[in-house]
Image (tube, coloured by chain):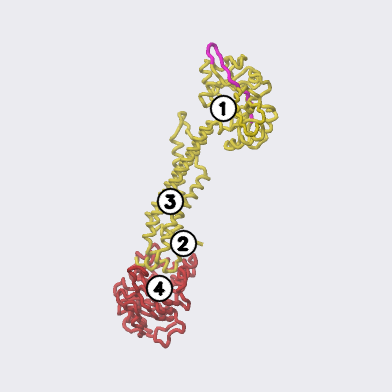
Amino acid sequence: MLGFESRVATRFLREGRMQTVLIIIGVAAGVAVVAYISALITGLQRNTIEKTLGAQAHLIISPLDDTVLAARAPASAGTRELVQTQPRAQRPASIANWQTLVPLLEAMPEVAAVSPMVSAAGLAVRGEATKAIALVGVDLDRYDRIIGLRSKVVAGVARLGPGEGIIGRDLADDLGVRVGDRVGIVTGGVNDSLRVTALVDLGVRELNRRTVIVPLRTAQSLVSLPGGATSLDLTVVDIWSAQALAGDLAARWPYKAESWQQSNAQLVSALNAQSVSTALIRGVVLVVVVLGIASVLVVSVVQKQREIGILRAMGATQGQVLRIFLLQGAIVGALGSALGVLLAVLLIGAFTYFVRGSDGLPLFNISLEPMLALRVAAIATVCGVLAAVAPARRAARLDPAQAIRL
Amino acid sequence: MSDAVKAPAPLIVLDGIRKTYNAGLPNEAEVLHGVSFSLGHGEFVALIGPSGSGKSTLLNIVGLLERASGGSYRVEGAETAGLDDAALTLRRRTSLGFVFQFHHLLPAFSALENVTLPSLMREGRVTPAARERARAVLAAVGLAQAIDKRPGELSGGMQQRVAIARALVLEPPLVLADEPTGNLDTASSDEVFALMRRMHAELGTSFLVVTHDPRLAARCDRVLELVDGRLVRDASQTATTATTATATPAAAPA
């Protein structure tokens, strides 16, 4: 189909070897940078999110806040009323009918796991030491599916039988507690004690300092919510669907649904800012690559003016000359991006090999996804063609009579 | 050949051709002032004249590389004045062959590839038949041994012969040559010119040759003389004897 144009284009490229190699290297460098940065940022963000969500639910359902509605006389026309109300203090409240809600949620395809929880503030006491804690009552197996609790155990064995509890490692240090010791719990004026079966590292220092995990029933009686649950923790299949799902649930049922994006708003906006600046860098790099190709091709057109004149005199149409140069752009774009992807893979390999955590394992898990590589290569090829447009049009418009005289 | 045996329908007809450069600008210059002549099939014509007389401009107009500013130019009966660039290009491709002063081969292609370029351009690929034809033409110009050599590896005379082969490969009715021997020494000039005459005899192709070498002009069948943009002489002359191996004095017109 483009037999003539491709034969001439490849031969022209071979003839101007130095320039061709230069352009290909330029494209390769640009593509490598773009692919490497994309893979790096994507990998880092994924790692960050995994760590953040390591000790959190993706979505939390809780009862709606108690609000105060002012009793008002119907407003008469022409008057405006200013109302002031005192916001009510929130008490621990249970989600009405949560037991029927759980199977409904589990049936949804987007939901991976559901775990009811009773949480309350309290104190942990041992001897003279008293520490403020967040008391969390759960069903161990369900909770394990939410935050992988069993994999976070650093001492002892995770068990939540009656009178048993699991505490954060830093809290254990602060209280001088080891596996098997007893710890006193005070909450809402009720005292209890539990025997520590395991210590956990939840990955976040603050959590390790304050978390005490007890069986669901224990928490229910401590907080005077028999059979109740103050929240439902959910994990979802696609973490990015959490926000939409939260909105959906809140609209459907009279509950509050908060996604992890909402609870970690600062992190999310930081990640977004990162993504935006990465996109900016990629855009700039591509523009530079396009300009580089274009400038070298312009020189090539100037050098080849006589040959273009000969071709035109022999009967090559303007369209054929245009396509010869556009093809040159496409070829160097494709070759350059192939080389660039290869370079990116090497760079990523080097990164994974050299950047290690204190435990000797690679700090981050970065890889170049085939789809990303393909996309970048396709864009680079298109950029090659775009870069060739201006020089190609110039070549096509050359006056054959004058070009021949050169 | 003499007028009596001119081909019935002329190949090209120029009528009152004028060419003005920089029209409307202060440096406006009319280079051709109403040139008229016609060429039939199988003619071998020299276009002579002093430098600056407009020979190359006239040849470019005949070759559809430039448009005339006025007058009519018909090729194989069809008027060329209203045609757009694409149509002119097509007409160039089918009706004309070019030989330039500097060989003007593509340096990145071998001799054979240069000669197959016109077919490649037309068909989008080089058919076996086209390749065979190219080999045959290269053999006819005496370069059977050099088909895979690049222009850079050939002498000036050989390059010019490749150029002639390329001009003839698609058998156009008319070949335009702009000082084809201008860059060659005497021996090579004679060789190349003899080749052109032989091709003319064998294929019946018409040749319009711009030259300022009076010896070569004398060996053409007809002379057009251009002075200051005007045709001052249009005379036929028998191909004079002298040197070459063209033993047939009456080169038969097509």
Q: Are marks 3 and 1 on the same chain?
A: yes
Mark number for residue A290?
3
Which chain is indicated by disc 2?
A
Callout 1, which amino acid? Ser
Residue B32 location (% of width, % of height): 36, 76
User: To which quarter of the image does residue A264 belong?
Assistant: top right
Residue A190, relative to residue A310: is it above or below?
above
Please state which of residues B254 and B68 is positioned toward the viewer in this rendering.
B68
Callout 3, which amino acid? Val
Q: State which quarter of the image contains the N terminus of chain B.
A: bottom left
Q: State left or right for residue A168 relative to residue B176.
A: right
Please state which of residues B207 and B49 is positioned toward the viewer in this rendering.
B49
Mark number for residue A5?
2
Nearer-N-terminus badge (3/2): 2
Which chain is indicated by disc 3?
A
Q: State which quarter of the image contains the C terminus of chain B.
A: bottom left
The residue wearing badge 1 is: A151
Residue B225 location (% of width, % of height): 33, 80
Magenta span includes A116 = yes
Q: Which chain is red?
A: B
